[in-house]
Amino acid sequence: MNKALLHIEGLAALILSIYFYAQTDASWLMFALLLLAPDLSALGYIINNKIGAYTYNAFHTYTPPLLIILISTSLKTDTLLLSLGLIWATHIAMDRMIGYGLKDPSDPKITHLQKL
């Protein structure tokens, strides 16, 4: 039950992120090109599992993109920062909807969603 709710929550966040991105009139090409960019954080696994989990998790939690969205809307800056934050949030939401979660440092195949 809890796992299903988290998948639904990911779907809702995905829909909202895409909806708000569409309101920015930003480039959909940029959206497509950057949507998977947060997965580059998995390159930390080249060093070891602990570093890999740290870098992956740092780029797969909602806090950084939400801060970027908050700062860009508070400062009323151009849409680039807002667009980047929304693309990043969309990526995380997509991962959560599919079932990818934050990585355990002991094994990259273990995520917080699998522990539910």
Image (cartoon, rainbow, N blue to C red):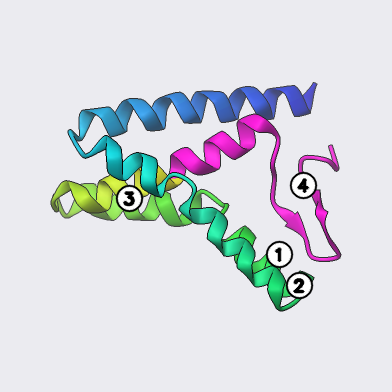
| Neighbourhood count class around disc 3 (C-alpha, 10 Å): few under 14, some 14–19, many 20 upward | many
Residue 17 position in % (x across, y down): 39, 32
Disc nearer the start of the sequence (1/4) = 1
Q: Name the quadrant of the N terminus.
A: top right
Q: Which residue is mark 4?
A: 112
Disc nearer the start of the sequence (3/2) = 2
Report whether residue 59 is seen. no
Report the Cα–Cα distance between label 3 and label 2: 27 Å
Q: Which residue is mark 3?
A: 84
Q: Name the quadrant of the C terminus.
A: top right
Report the Cα–Cα distance between label 1 and label 4: 12 Å
Mark 4 residue type: His
Mark nearest the camera among 2 and 4 is 2
Disc nearer the start of the sequence (1/3) = 1
Q: Which residue is mark 2?
A: 50
Mark 1 residue type: Ala
Report the Cα–Cα distance between label 4 and label 3: 25 Å
Q: Quadrant of residue 103?
A: bottom right
Q: Which portion, as a residue range, is magenta?
A: 89-116
- Residue positioned 51% across, 48% down in the render: 62
Question: Do labels 1 and 2 touch, CB within 8 Å?
Answer: yes
Left or right side of 30 for 17: right
- Residue positioned 33% across, 25% down in the render: 19
Mark 3 residue type: Leu
Is the residue 23 above or below the residue 71 in the image?
Answer: above
Question: Do labels 1 and 4 touch, CB within 8 Å?
Answer: no
